[in-house]
Amino acid sequence: MNGHYSLGLEDTDRVNHAVGGGIPEGSLVLIEGVDGAGKSVWTQRMCYGMAEEDTYIAYVSTELTAADFMQQMHSLSYDIVEHMLSGQVLFLHADVDTHRGGDRRELLSKLTEPSTLWQGDVIVVDAFSAFLRNDPRFDAIAAHGDEDHEMESVLTFLQGMTSRGKTVVLTADPEATTERALRPIRSTADVFMQIETEEVGQEIRRNVRVRRFSNMKQPVDDGIAFNVQQGRGLTIVNRTIA
C-alpha cells in the first residue's frame, strides 16, 4: 500500500502538514499518553479531517456515548453530525464495565470478532488500554506475566486487518495497563506517537514525540507541539522543545 489518508482541513490548521501529509493506508497506529494528555482530541481531529476527505471511519469509544461524542466534537468546531447521518462516520460506544451485574465478558475477543466496526477504511479504538484493563481473562493472564503472549494473538488479528488496506488507530494510557502488554504493540506499530505534557506556570504544554512513522509521505518532525482550544480544536504551535 502506497496511499495515504489525508487529515484534511489544510485551510484551518497545520495538522495534516505536521504528520507529513497523511496517515499511511494499511498501517497500525499507536497514540500513547496518560489520562488527559490529548489522545482523544488527536483521534477526533483525525476522524473529522478524514471524513471531510471522504474516508469512511469507524470510531469506538470506551468513555463517550454518541451524544457525548457529538457534543465534544461540536465544542472543538468539528461538525461531525452530517458525517454520522450519512454513514461516513460510524460511532460505537463500548461498555467495558465487566463487573456490573456479574457480567464477565471477555472484551478483547468481543473487540476482535467480525462486526460493523471493522468495515471502515480507518478504525479508531479509543481507548484500547481500557479493553485490556477491564478484560477479566486478560487480567488473569497478566497475573502470570503472560500479557505479551496474549497480545501476539491480538496483533495477528490487527495485522490481518491492515493487510487488507485498513488503517487501525489505537490509543493507550501506559498507566492503565502493563509494560509487557504495550511492548508488542509499540514494536509492531507502523506509526508510534507518544504524547507528553509539561506544566509551565499555569500553562499545560503538549508535545507529540514521533517514535516511528513508517512509509511517511513527506518528512515528519520528531516533535509536534500542539494546543487544544474550545472552539478551535487541535492546533499545531511553533515551539522549541528541549
Image: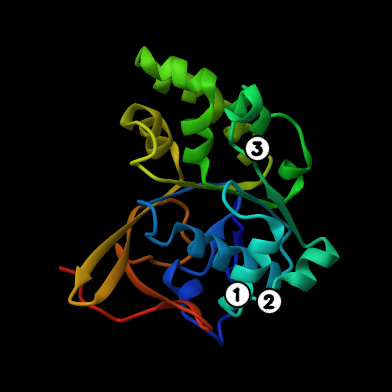
Q: Which residue is mark 3?
A: 161
Question: Which label lies toward us, 2 or 1?
Answer: 2
Front-most of residues 189 and 173: 173
**Left or right for 76, reference 66:** left
Residue 27 position in % (x across, y down):
55, 47
Q: Which residue is mark 2?
A: 79
**Left or right for 60, reference 241:** right
Q: Which residue is mark 1?
A: 8
Mark with earlier residue (2, 1): 1
Residue shown at the point (38%, 34%) measured from the top left: 177
Mark with earlier residue (2, 3): 2
Question: Which label lies toward us, 2 or 3?
Answer: 2
Identified by mark 2, the residue type is: Asp
**Left or right for 224, reference 167:** left
Mark with earlier residue (1, 3): 1
Identified by mark 1, the residue type is: Gly
